[in-house]
Image: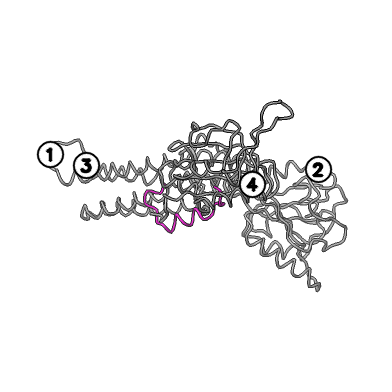
């Protein structure tokens, strides 16, 4: 289990650093309320340790609580104003008492003005009174260690923060709500049930107990195996939902790659000129197509050149092509099919490809059709004929992209989708042990061999929810969080 002192009170700035309307300093731990007592002065005079949970209070953070309030008439109300001296900031303070808080500890959130100076001064003040700076993800780590959420739900917190589309957010929220954890626990229960029946069948063969036969246990394990295999098949779709895909626009110089990039982004992101070689480096931006985050990459035109800058741009283009999940191979309808086109096709033949023929508003000089392209690619590829300048057939191109990356409509409410690579690895490990158990039954091995395999399968699934995850895994997960979460 993670080596962490839960007796410490931790603090951190929980909002992005910079200028903004509001910034939050968050405290969690046994001393959170007593620290707040020492620095917060309310208009009514009560102290944070006396406040009820889930309440917010207006007041000031002061550097020295011993400073007496200055009684003077408020110019607006005519009533005495108890604004103290030594004020660091005017704030709203929120109290959340254990165990009904994010960390299941006493939590205090100080809503300051969103500048770096007041936030830094408030944080330094609470650290000087006994809190320590939180480690990355330590608030969520405490929520996990204190039993409020499991490890899969903790990872979902990060997925919610990083979600790039509504569909990605939808699946992250389902995981945060325990959807995946519940399904994993169901699989564990099924395996445990098989193990219990196996032990009963072997230990009490003459007793009239309601237990499965060895044949029924093998059939049950085969059903669990099939269920795991179907779950693993969902990973490709799940990875796309969570991470998106790299979609690289490639082609020789001046076929309209940058113009297409700008049109897809609906902004002038890339410089466009009639001069070949204008784009010298790959430029990437995210767009949302059908709920999928698409990292669209405009690359330098691939051509033969002696210009050192163009050569470097082409080298980087090829690196992006190596990482591409989908390639938009662009050709110019106003130009003949060239040796450069053939060389590019040869370099991308193994990729998922959509062939995009641009400039169909001009006189057609491209002397190759879909069947000709099939000969060069070695298979049929979708072809989209467009004009970026005249905005012709762009919707059809977007549909081609969506169809290529998203086969069929997947609804979060209807499916258990595997979105996390760590979870996939654990399910794969569990599947191997289930197959071992089935093989042991088929070969009439000792019952202990089957039991060991089932225990290992249950432990592998437990890695997903944190029931049996190693300290190294936990550290790696929580190190990805920002300090204030």
Mark pair 1, 2: CA separation: 77 Å
Q: Is residue 469 magenta?
A: yes
Residue 307, can we see it?
A: yes
Which is in the foreground here, disc 4 or disc 2?
4
Q: Secondary structure at mark 4?
A: strand
For the rendered model, the colour scheme is one colour
Q: Quadrant of residue 252?
A: bottom right
Q: Is residue 150 magenta?
A: no
Q: Which residues are magenta?
A: 465-485
Crowding at mark 1 (Cα within 10 Å: few <14, some 14-19, many 20+): few
Mark pair 1, 4: CA separation: 59 Å
CB under 8 Å between discs 1 and 3: no
Figure label count? 4
The residue depicted at 23 percent of the width and 45 percent of the height is: 198
Check disc 1 and report the residue beneath it: 207
Residue at far left of view: 206
**Of 94 and 221, the residue lying toward us:** 94
141 is higher (above) or lower (below) than 212: below
Q: Secondary structure at mark 3?
A: loop
* Sequence-first disc among 1 and 3: 1
Mark pair 4, 3: CA separation: 49 Å
Which is in the foreground here, disc 1 or disc 2?
1
Residue 432 vs residue 204: left or right?
right
- Picture coordinates of residue 460 (x, y %)? 37, 52
The residue depicted at 47 percent of the width and 53 percent of the height is: 422
Check disc 2 and report the residue beneath it: 392
**Which disc is residue 293 wearing?**
4
Which is in the foreground here, disc 1 or disc 4?
4
Check disc 3 and report the residue beneath it: 213
- Picture coordinates of residue 293 (x, y %)? 64, 46
* Sequence-first disc among 1 and 2: 1
Mark pair 2, 3: CA separation: 66 Å
């Amino acid at each position: 289990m993670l080596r962490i002192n839960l007796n410490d009170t931790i603090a951190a700035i929980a909002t992005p650093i910079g200028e903004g309307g509001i910034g939050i300093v968050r405290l969690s731990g046994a001393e959170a309320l007593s620290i707040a007592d020492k620095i917060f002065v309310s208009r009514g005079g009560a102290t944070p340790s006396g406040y009820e949970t889930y309440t917010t209070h207006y007041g000031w953070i002061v550097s020295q609580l011993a400073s007496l309030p200055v009684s003077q008439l408020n110019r607006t109300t005519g009533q005495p104003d108890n604004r103290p001296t030594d004020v660091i900031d005017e704030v709203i303070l929120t109290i959340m008492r254990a165990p009904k808080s994010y960390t299941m500890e006493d939590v205090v959130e100080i809503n300051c003005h969103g500048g770096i100076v007041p936030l830094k001064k408030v944080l330094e003040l609470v650290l000087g009174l006994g809190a320590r700076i939180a480690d990355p993800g330590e608030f969520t780590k405490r929520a996990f260690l204190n039993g409020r959420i499991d490890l899969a739900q903790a990872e979902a917190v990060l997925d919610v923060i990083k979600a790039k589309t509504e569909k990605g957010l939808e699946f992250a929220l389902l995981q945060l709500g325990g959807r995946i954890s519940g399904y994993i626990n169901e699989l564990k229960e099924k395996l445990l049930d098989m193990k219990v029946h196996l032990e009963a069948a072997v230990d009490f063969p003459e007793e009239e107990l309601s237990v499965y036969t060895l044949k029924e246990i093998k059939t049950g394990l085969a059903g669990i195996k099939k269920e795991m295999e179907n779950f693993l098949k969902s990973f490709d779709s799940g990875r796309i939902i969570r991470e998106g895909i790299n979609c690289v626009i490639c082609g020789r110089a001046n076929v309209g790659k940058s113009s297409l990039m700008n049109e897809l982004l609906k902004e002038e992101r890339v410089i466009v000129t009639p001069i070949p070689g204008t784009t010298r480096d790959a430029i990437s931006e995210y767009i949302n197509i059908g709920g999928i985050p698409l990292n669209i990459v405009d690359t330098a035109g691939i051509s033969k050149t002696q210009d050192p800058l163009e050569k470097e741009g082409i080298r980087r283009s090829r690196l992006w092509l190596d990482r591409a999940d989908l390639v938009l191979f662009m050709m110019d309808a106003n130009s003949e099919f060239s040796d450069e086109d053939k060389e590019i096709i040869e370099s991308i033949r193994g990729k998922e490809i959509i062939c995009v023929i641009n400039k169909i508003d001009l006189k057609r000089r491209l002397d190759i059709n879909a069947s000709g392209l099939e000969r060069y690619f070695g298979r049929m590829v979708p072809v989209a004929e467009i004009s970026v300048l005249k905005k012709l057939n762009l919707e059809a191109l977007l549909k081609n992209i969506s169809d290529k990356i998203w086969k069929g409509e997947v609804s979060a409410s209807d499916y258990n989708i595997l979105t996390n690579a760590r979870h996939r690895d654990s399910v794969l490990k569990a599947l191997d042990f289930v197959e071992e158990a089935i093989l042991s039954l088929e070969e009439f091995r000792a019952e202990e061999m089957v039991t060991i395999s089932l225990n290992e399968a249950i432990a592998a699934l437990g890695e997903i929810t944190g029931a049996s995850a190693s300290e190294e895994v936990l550290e790696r997960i929580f190190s990805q969080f920002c300090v204030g979460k």
